Image: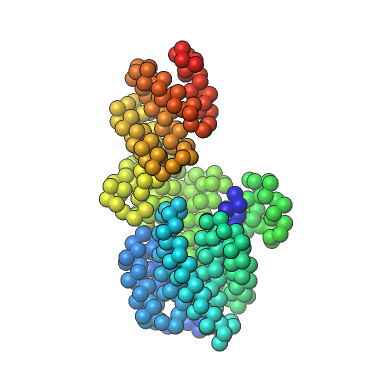
Amino acid sequence: MKVLIIEILFVLIYSSLSPAKTSGTKIKDPQFDSLITTGIKQIYNIKFKDAERTFSIVMKKYPHHPAGRFFKAMIIWWKIMLDTENEEYDDLFVDKLDSVIAMCDSILEKDPDNVDALFFKGGSLGFRGRLYSLRKKWFDAALDGKEALPLVHKVYEIDPQNEEVKLGFGIYNYYAEAIPEKYPFIKPVMIFFPGGNKKLGIQQLKETAQKSKYASIEAKFFLLTLNYQFEENFKEAFKYAKELTKEFPDNPTFEKYLGRIYVKQGDYYKASNVFQDMLIKCNENLPGYNSRIKREASYYIGVKLEMEKKLDSALTMFNQCLKFSKIVDDDTPSGFWISAVWYLGKIYDEKKNIPKAIEYYKSLLDLPEYRDSHDKAEKYLEEHGDG
C-alpha cells in the first residue's frame, strides 16, 4: 500500500508531456509532433528498437529540446515495467533521467519560465521517484517528489489550458479520495496532502483521454486500472482494455487486463482466447511475454478446460502453471501456484484417481493459506479417510 501511495504521488508528474511548447513559442516543424506521437506509440506497443530510432531522429533534429532524451528514458522505463522484479535496467534509467534533468537545468538558468524545461525536469524527477519507490528507497523517492511537484504547479500557472496537465491532476484527484476510502488506515497520512475528488478526477482523465495529444494513452490506461481495481466497474474497464489492446496488440500489460476482465465477467471462452494468444507470443519470445505471463495464461486456460471437462488438457495447463510458478515465485508461493495445486487435486478426483488427488491435497496443506485452500484440502482428506 505504501508503494501505491508514493507511486500515485509521483505519477502526478507524468502530466509533464507537452513538448510542442517552449516558453510561449511553438516549434513550427510539423515533423516534431509527428515524430513524438509515433515514438510514444512505438513505446506502448513495445517496439523498443523502432522507438529508439525515432527518438534518435528527434535528438538529431532538435538537439536543444529535452523531448528526445526524455522519451529515450521512457523506453527503458517500459523495459522495467515489463518485469519489475528485474533490476538490470535501473542504473541506465537513472543515468538517462539525470541527463534530461541536467539539460533542463541548463535551459532554466537562462529562462526560468521555459515550459518544456519545467515539464521534462518534473517528468524526469517523477519517474526517477517512481523507480525509487518501486525499489523501496523511500527517502530518495520523497526527495524527488518534493522537488517535482512545484514544477508541475508552475507549469499549470503558466499554461492553465494545457490538456496534458489534466492527466496528473486527474490521477491525484481520484486516488487522493479513493485510497483513504478503500484503506481507512491511510487517512492519517493523507492529512499532509491536498484533498481529492473522485468524480472530478475521472472527468479530468476522460478529458485527457479525449483531447490530449501526448498523454491520451496514459489517461486511458489509468481509467482502465481505476475502474478495474477500485470502482470494480468491469464494463467501463473493458472499454479501455479493448481499445488499448486493439491499438497496441503486443503490449502484454494491456492484453493481460483484457483477459482478466473477461474472467471477471465470467466469460472464460474469450478469456482463454486472449491468454492463448499471449502464450503464442511467449513462444515467439516477444518482449514482456515472459514466465509470469506463461504462469497466468496457463492457469486461466486450464480453468476453462476443466470447466469443459477436458481433463487431460487441463492437467497439462495446470502443471505448466505450477512449473512457471516455481520459477517466478521462488520461495513465496503465489495464488496461481496454490490454486493450480488445488485444481490438480480436483481434476485427479474427477478422474477417479483418488491416491493422486490425496497427494495434491496433502501438498496443499504445506503451502500458505489462500482462499480457504486449507479448509478445502482438510475437508477432502477427511472425506477420503486421510484427514
For the question of whether residue 286 can be seen, the reply is yes
Which residue lies at the image location 33% right of the left edge and 29% below the top edge? 315
Front residue of 212 and 82: 82
Task: Tell me residue 332's x, y (percent).
Answer: 48, 40
Residue at x 58% of width, y 62% of height: 141
Give above or below for 207 relative to 150. above
Please state the horizontal and vertical placement of residue 68, each as a whole percent of the image. Answer: 41, 74
Up-down: is 30 above or below 244? below
- Outermost left residue: 284
Q: Quadrant of residue 91?
A: bottom left
**Is 162 on the left or on the right of 362, as rendered?**
right
Task: Name above or below for residue 239 compared with residue 307.
Answer: below
From the viewer's side, name the closer residue of 308 and 360.
360
Which image quadrant is residue 38 in? Answer: bottom left
Q: Is residue 160 left or right of residue 335?
A: right
Image side of residue 191 versus residue 23, left or right: right
Residue 301: in sight, yes or no? no
Pick out the residue farthest to the front: 331
The residue drawn where x is 46% and y is 12% is 385
122 or 341, which lies in front?
Answer: 341
The image shows residue 88, relative to residue 313, as above or below, that is: below
Residue 275, by quadrant, is top left
State the count of labels.
0
Q: How is the image coloured?
A: rainbow
Task: Left or right? Give the position of 192 relative to 271.
Answer: right
Q: Position of residue 251 (x, y in %)?
A: 38, 55
Looking at the image, the residue that sits furthest to the top is 385
Coordinates of residue 242 in the picture (x, y in percent): 41, 50
Residue at coordinates 43% horizontally, 74% vertically from top-left?
Answer: 69
